[in-house]
Image: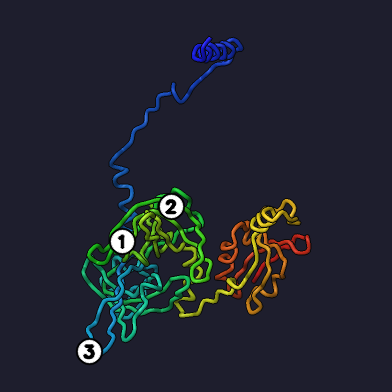
Amino acid sequence: MNRKILKVFISLLILLLFTGCGFNVDNKINNEVYDVEIDINEIDQAFVPAIEIASESTLGITVYNKKSYAKDWEAISVGSCVIYEGIAITKDGDKINIKDSYTRDDINTYKYKAVTNAHVVEGGKGSNKYVIYDGDTDSSWELDILGKDTDIDLAVVSFESPVLYIPITFADSDLVKKGQIVLAVGNSNGYEYYSSATMGIISYPKRYTEESGYAMEYIQHDAAINPGNSGGALVNIKGELVGINTSKIVEDDVDSMGFAIPVNTVKKVLNRLENGEVINKSSQLFDGDTITSLKLNAFLNAVENNLGSLDYGYKLSHVPRYSIFYSYFKIDDIVLEVNNQKIYNELFFKHSLMLCESGDKVSINLIRNNELVVFDIE
């Protein structure tokens, strides 16, 4: 009996066994007919409101530089910013909520606050002027820089305009999922393509990288972004802000790898930036190893690891002396969780504490001298 005949015989035998024993073989995938109606018009219009909302609050920023009196003003930076707060001022000087101004005819001006990247408002040597730009009306207004942090790459600016803009609504970036649709709005490649919109998905919601010695968290996505998109909005399909676009990987063999600063990071530092405060980041002075790294090193060197069944955590070998953490942690502590999040990654551990300051509450689970210790940093 050749192999082909043998396979047919075995297949028939298996079928007879199932039918003879009273089993019903029900292949639902092949046998069910699905009646699905797809409304193409609904799909076509699905993202229009979100883009309109993001476009309403996303404007341009130009930095002009003059190196000397003999030189002309030169545009050295073009980027984007996102309006998140504003008030209306009446002709009598009263300050009212923007929503209350919609039906008023006595509004004199509006004052806004917007968030952008610090590198967008980086000036040059000599004199600098900073300008907001609205491509739809081809209008410009002078802006003030309230505060910026070059490490986090965020800045807050303010400006005054007679034009009504609707501040964007913040989402919760901790709820962002891989595969979720996102939209990017900004001035792609400059004002010739002002207020451009692109669509993509979240490639990875919490991507940790080290930038200038600091542990940074980004939202990785594949919505097309280009020079000029920096500081612009990354929004969900509701038009809510999930991140501030900041960079992309530019290499010949790399495509569609863009990065946005999560809006929850923006929320943590917004008040401090508004007030021009310096943001301390002492968590970078921690040193140690993850449990997975220690176990791998022990395996490679064929030595005992003495870590038992523990498979996550960060073992401290140095605690920054001049920081709010010094009285809470000790060398050889194995930090298991920060705010109920298990620690598998060194950069996650450092980033989770990076923006903490006195008064913030952070829950910690750790092992000290083989005992579980739970406490709050405040």
Tell whether 115 sits left or right of 74.
Answer: right
Point 23% across, 72% down: residue: 139
Q: Nearer the viewer, residue 54 or 252?
A: 252
Disc 2 marks a residue whose amino acid type is Ile
Which image quarter: residue 109?
A: bottom left
Q: Secondary structure at mark 1?
A: helix
Q: Amino acid at mark 3?
A: Ala
Task: Tell me the distance, in whole angstroms, between the alpha carbons under discs 1 and 3.
Answer: 38 Å
> Residue 320, position in %: x, y?
64, 75
The label number, if any, that marks residue 55 in the structure image:
1
Q: Relative to 28, is 9 above or below?
A: above
Q: Earlier in the sequence, mark 1 or mark 2?
A: 1
> In terms of sequence position, does the residue under pointer 2 or pointer 3 come before the other?
3
Q: Height in image: 9 above or below 90?
A: above
Q: Residue at x 70, y 65 (%)?
A: 375
Q: CA distance from mark 2 to mark 3?
A: 48 Å
Question: Could you say whether the residue bearing mark 3 is in a helix, strand or loop?
Answer: loop
The CA distance from mark 1 to mark 2 is 20 Å
The disc label shown at residue 93, or none: none
Q: As shown in the figure, which amino acid type bears the numbered disc 1?
A: Ser
Provide the residue designation for mark 3: 70
At 40% from the left edge and 56% from the top edge, which residue is drawn? Answer: 257
Horizontal side of 233 relative to 217 (left or right) equals left
Identify residue for label 2: 202
Instruction: Nearest to the eye among marks 1 and 2: give it.
Output: 2
